[in-house]
Every structure is written in C-alpha cells, then in structure tokens.
Amino acid sequence: QKEVEQDPGPLSVPEGAIVSLNCTYSNSAFQYFMWYRQYSRKGPELLMYTYSSGNKEDGRFTAQVDKSSKYISLFIRDSQPSDSATYLCAMTLKAAGNKLTFGGGTRVLVKP
Amino acid sequence: GAGVSQSPSNKVTEKGKDVELRCDPISGHTALYWYRQSLGQGLEFLIYFQGNSAPDKSGLPSDRFSAERTGGSVSTLTIQRTQQEDSAVYLCASSLVATGSNQPQHFGDGTRLSIL
C-alpha cells in the first residue's frame, strides 16, 4: 500500500462546477501538505501549501486538512477549461530534509 | 523572476551510454531536490542538497546514479550505463533553507529522458 493514495480519475466536470479532489495518507507524522497542478509536459506548479488541520482559501481554491482522519482535500470553485490538468497532492515531515511524498495525481477535465 | 531551469528539456540516448542532466535553481534557494516521474511509479524523490552537501541520497535507485552541486547553485544528475527502465522525466525543485523550517518547493519543467 502506498503512503499517499489519490484517485487517478479522470474527473470530468462541466465548466463552472466545483471540482473536489482528495488524498488519504497513512503516515501520521506528515505535517505539511501541498497541492500542485501539472499541465502536460510541464513541471508541477504549487497551488496551495498548508500546515495543521483546517481550511485555507486562495481565490477559487480551498484546501482542507483533517489530520485525525489523515485526509486532505482541494476544492476548485467556478472551474474553467484552463483548470484541466493533473492535480498532485504532496506532503512532508517536519524535518528529514523536507523531501516530498506525492500521491499519484488526479487528472481533471473541465468541459466548456 | 526566473524559475528553476533544467536542461536539456529532452534527451534521447542509447542503452549503455552516460547522461548528464542539469538544474539551475531559483536564485537564493539553498535547498535543491531531484525527483523522477514515471508512468508506473509516479513522482519519486531521488536526492536533496543543502548547499553543496547531500544529506539524503536515499532515493537514488542504484550506484549508476550520482549527483553533485557546486557553488551552492547548479546541480548535475549523472546516470551511467543507462538502462531502458531509466526512461522517465527527471524533475528538479528548489526551496529556501530546508533545515529548521519547512519551505515550499518550486519545480522546473524537467528533462524527458528516453533510452532506446
């Protein structure tokens, strides 16, 4: 079993809908949680960066962390075709060189 | 400002040849990371540098893989005697100081390596 599980999708939604993404993890020592967006043939682009349980909002993006359930989520409001990409969750320990452990990524398609 | 720069963007080589991949981090970022992204394995950590030293090499898959960093800036990942299973996208990331605090990592667009 992988340390971080993420549904590979694809997740297809109509333009304007809310996109809901999530990851579960097994290592309770993870402290920092990130969401990256990756377009085809590009590197991952940092979207959200959170520490501790709770919600964080940035524009159309909301990240949620529930450490008690080892579950993180990303919501994208008013989705646009330009949001079509692969979304990767990542997490890291507080120390240990801060290397990231990634989920496998969810492919999202927003249809006009 | 300039992001993480990687070269070449694409590399095709024959099995058994050596390859060198280059990463130029964001200016002022002292921490540098190499990852590998392949279809079957997703995105996996290879090695991280703090300055010119590499405290964690735990992700390097075999002794054919090595990396160095000079001047606290540019890093080179070298793969010797390449094998077909080395085909993947090699991604570099950098961040502000890694020890004592956690800083987000910013990625380059990677080098797409194909071994024939």
Image (spheres, helix red, strand yellow):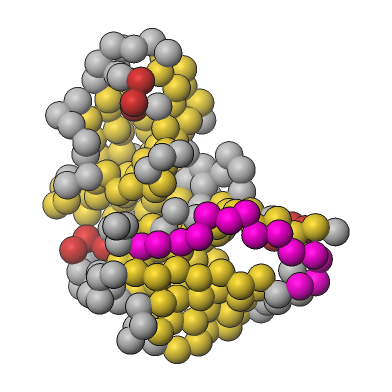
- The structure residue drawn at horizontal position 61% and vertical position 72%, both measured from the top left corner, is A20
Picture coordinates of residue B62 (x, y %)? 18, 31
Q: Nearer the viewer, residue A26 or A33?
A: A26
Vertical side of B84 occupied by B54: above or below: below
Q: Horizontally, is B109 left or right of B101 in the view?
A: right
- The structure residue drawn at horizontal position 50% and vertical position 87%, both measured from the top left corner, is A55
Please identify the quarter of the rendering in which residue A58 is found.
Answer: bottom right
Please identify the quarter of the rendering in which residue B91 is found.
Answer: top left
- The structure residue drawn at horizontal position 80% and vertical position 58%, both measured from the top left corner, is A111
Q: Nearer the viewer, residue B25 or A45?
A: A45
Picture coordinates of residue B55 (x, y %)? 14, 52
Q: Is residue B96 visible?
A: no
Q: Is residue A13 visible?
A: yes
- The structure residue drawn at horizontal position 51% and vertical position 26%, both measured from the top left corner, is B10
Q: Horizontally, is A76 left or right of A32 in the view?
A: right
Q: Residue furthest front?
A: A1
- The span shown in magenta is A4-17
Q: Nearer the viewer, residue A67 or B7?
A: A67
Is residue A7 shown in magenta? yes
User: On the rendered image, what quadrant is the N terminus of chain A found in?
Assistant: bottom left
User: On the rendered image, what quadrant is the C terminus of chain A found in?
Assistant: bottom right
Q: Nearer the viewer, residue B48 or B61?
A: B61
Picture coordinates of residue A100 (x, y %)? 33, 59
Vertical side of B33 occupied by B68: above or below: above
Picture coordinates of residue A61 (x, y %)? 62, 76
Please identify the quarter of the rendering in which residue B65 is found.
Answer: top left
